[in-house]
Amino acid sequence: MQPMLPIALPSLPIRPVTRFAPSPTGYLHLGHVSNAVWTWGIARAAGGTVLLRIEDHDRGRCRPEYERAIREDLEWLGLLPDRQSLQSDDAEVYREALERLGRSAHVYGCLCSRADIARRIESEPADGEERRYPGTCRDLGIPLHDGAGCRVVLGEETVGFDDIRLGPQQQTPARQCGDLLLRDPTGNWTYQLCVTVDDARQGVTLIIRGEDLLASTGRQILLGRMLGRQHPAAFLHHPLIVNEQGAKLSKRDRATGIRELRAGGRSPESVLGEAAWRTGLLPELRPVGVSELAGLFR
């Protein structure tokens, strides 16, 4: 058996606080486990703390049974957090953040649906690019009432940051996404606002997540700065596990669902080992115990 090859991470924060942050809109799959392997492994290697943050800000799609299943699957895998939080407990925190933004930035009501935005954009985005909001409602004076979304103008600032794994990055959020949606028309707080607020107030100093979320980093740093966080967390974006079509795994990929793997007789060690191997942390496929995760990094 070949030895493990620890991944060198020379610029980690000292005793980092990081988070594993699933949304209870479905069951966990192997892609979630890969993020957990990187998160727990790096935290334990660096003497850090793992926060389990259930990101249930979308009250229309989140279900209590999915939340219970997430906790059960993590316990089965042996991945025990040091702290826990639930976003649905913190609506008042996000409301206060919106009020603070409104005192220092251009925050406005927006009546545009996704279909409206698509119709107003002349051409479809290229592969890998997102649809940029064109600012349709910016100067219409729409109040922040029920039934209206809420956006903030980000300005044309370019944000630079060093990803621990991918190196120097530069992003201009206004050119990527346009004015950032903070609350949707149904009253749900958005992912971008909630994670930015939570990472600051919960003292998160290291954000470990998949490469699919790299594009969100600049806007979260900029939004955090607008909310008063002058020293953002460090970021590490790890490789994704993809399906047979080359797309990242989703909650519809039942073949990689943890509940299905458990029912099929897989052991926690075999699932952790597959997640580690498929994201480049092992030279060969083999079982890995929770106690070994720290040894994958140095």
Image (cartoon, rainbow, N blue to C red):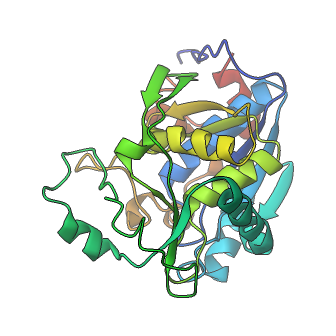
Residue 193 sits in which quadrant?
Answer: bottom right
Q: Residue furthest bottom?
A: 146
Pick the residue in front: 283 or 209: 209
| Number of numbered callouts drawn | 0
Q: Say if 64 sits above or below 70 in the image.
A: below
Which percent across, then down, holds residue 71? 72, 65
Task: Name the image quarter holding the C terminus.
Answer: top right
Is residue 91 among the parts visible in the rendering? yes
What is the x, y in percent for residue 8? 61, 13
Q: Is residue 124 left or right of residue 21?
A: left
Residue found 40% across the figure and 60% down from its top? 250
**In this orientation, which residue lies closer to the viewer: 277 or 143?**
143
Q: Residue at x 58, y 85 (%)?
A: 145
Residue 49 locus on image (x, y percent): 83, 39
Is 46 placed left or right of 74 in the picture?
Answer: right
Q: Is residue 1 left or right of residue 123?
A: right
Residue 260 drawn above or below residue 163: below
Compared to residue 80, the image places residue 239 above or below, namely above
